[in-house]
Amino acid sequence: MIEAQSLTKRYGSKTAVDDISFTIPPGSVTGFLGPNGAGKSTTMRMIMGLDRPTHGTVTVNGKPYARHRSPLSEVGALLDAKAIHPGRSARSHLRTMAATHGISTRRVDDVIDMTGLSSVATKRVGGFSLGMGQRLGIASAMLGDPRTLILDEPVNGLDPEGVLWVRHLVRELASEGRTVFLSSHLMSEMAQTADHLLVIGRGKILTAGPVQDVIDSVSGTSIRVRSPRAAELARLAARDGVTITSSEAGTLELRGTTAEAIGEAAAAHGIVLHELSQQRASLEDAYMSLTQDSVEYRSETTTTSQKEENR
Amino acid sequence: MTAAVAITDTATTALTPDAVTTAAPEPTASPAARAPRTPQPTLKARRTFLGTMRGEWIKLLSLRSTWWVLGSTAGIMTLLALGVASSLKALMADPLTAHAMSNANGAALVSSGFQLGMVTIAVLGALVITGEYSTGMIRSTFAAVPTRVPVLAAKAIAVVALTTGVAAAGIALSYLVTMGTLSKYGLVPALDRAETWRIFAGTAFCLIAAALFSFGVGTLLRSTAATVTVALTVLLLLPGILGFINVHWVQTFVRYLPMPASQAFLPSGDPNQGVGTPLSATVGVLVIAAYAIVPLVAAAVMVRRRDA
């Protein structure tokens, strides 16, 4: 469980995270979605006590992270695949982390096996590929068998097998009752992995909720029909709850009905169809329309703050 | 909103969370991807200061740079002692230096390499912390020990332990390689004299102070290059450069720089050494201690406040 209350972080005049409040529930995967520079990593660093909030508080399992007596068993974090000294071997890196909490070397070897790093465990991290570094970061996060996992862009640089593995891993961790909070700038990835979404843009929470609700709120399904007898078809399809628009002659956009219903109605009346397709705003389109609003919103706040400075 | 693309994207077919759970295939290449079954932690884990110290110890010993710096420190000390011993013949023959040399202290000659050793060990003090900031490792470190100050304490202790070890090794090696030459002039330091051990201890003290000074400065500056530059300037360059400025307050300042201050309690092996009136031995020790402690305290205060 992660709870943030009016969390704010400013770097000089730039507001990276702007007064956000949220709760990440245990037992599910929550996706933190936003474009680069939206404030995802800053928020995660504040959760981990690495960055000090300018304003507001954030707690993990009821306490600020730094107050926990065994921090690595509370939260495992993959914050940045580069948060590892390149001159050390993977195993040495994990051993230094484990030593602070008296975690056994056996557990170190377990997480190395778990993340598929056995063959390179004694190699220096400097020579690792992005994907291997990512696996090592996940191994570090798993080290303390934590109740909460915070993973910043975990699939970044992973091959398809690795992406599947991460997806499977986080689902399993959540099913065990753990809190899983992972960030991404790819909505399609989130749609396949997360139960809940927290969408952030320019430091503000844009929307939050179950994945499907978030997607539905920004994209509706519509049916596109092309027919020489479009007007006749429109009369047939018209009933309560169905909205019909026509952008050009012979083409209809219908909402609130199904492709099957249109197809059957057309066949029953012998109407020729040139096209019948289900239209869905793609996830990326939905996401773009979400974050585009935040850009507009942001430019408004910039001008007001400039006015304040000029005063 | 209405921007529409035909449903060809396979990703959109598995939108519901339930579908994801059942559709996610078993990973093929990672058969061991199986986490412990219980939601409550079963792993025995508790952060302790002793553990933090062990972690820092493993960190230091698992980097090649540590061994390079330790080796070069002991090596430089030994080579310089050998150089000084080899110059004895010429120094004794020269009437200008012969008198001073007859009063020379054997222990001081043996440990005369510590001045350059202070600079190389300062590199270790810097790397211990700046190496973490430059690589991002510091975020892993502070995630494991979010209270941060114990990390600094553990690092300081590890640095002191390694520096003590390398000081002992450097002095022992210097003693062995110069023994032959020094014995000709009756200058082999007597190991049963308190004075000998006082000088050896003072040498180790200076090396430890240099390492801690650099560690404290490194924690504040977070950059290896900047820290090594500061350490090199304060430890080695400033006394020489400012020595030429014959202004009273500058000369007073120079006496409080680490190298001249160390001369207050370490009789120099070099007869030409000495700038102005030396400090008393006690003040010298305190000044050197301040170089170690003041940056460390500032670092401990700042490390809690700043973002990692």
Image (spheres, rainbow, N blue to C red):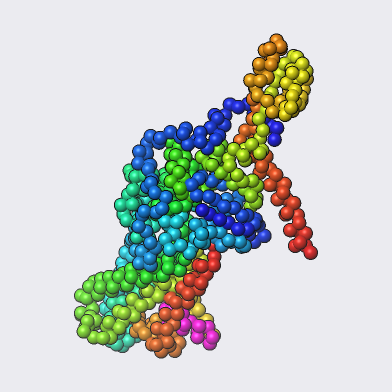
| Residue A307, x across and y down, in percent | 77, 59
**Residue B183 rendering spot, x and y as whole percentages:** 20, 79
Question: Is residue B256 on the magenta stretch?
Answer: yes
* Nearer to me, B220 or B87: B220
Front one among B176 and B294: B294
Q: Position of residue A96 (x, y in %)?
A: 37, 58
Of A210 and A65, nearer the camera is A210
Residue in the picture at 54% in, 86% down: B249
The residue under the point 51% across, 61% down is: A63
Residue B210 occupies quadrant: bottom left
Q: Is residue B5 above or below residue B243?
A: above
**How many numbered circles does the render carry?**
0
Does the segment drawn in magenta span residue A17? no
Q: Give the residue displayed 39% in from the left and 54% down from the top.
A: B41
Quadrant in which residue B181 is drawn: bottom left
Q: Quadrant of residue B15?
A: top right
Which x, y percent locates residue B118?
A: 39, 72
Q: Residue at x 66, y 44 (%)?
A: A291
Overall secondary structure of the magenta stretch? Answer: helix
The segment highlighted magenta reads B248-261
Q: Tell me if residue A205 can be seen.
A: yes
In the current view of this chain or complex, which residue is farthest to the top?
A270
Q: Is residue A57 left or right of residue B151?
A: right
Where is the C terminus of chain A found, in terms of image quarters?
Answer: bottom right
- Figure check: A177 above or below B261: above
Quick check: can you spot residue A9? no
The vertical placement of A27 against A5, above or below, is above
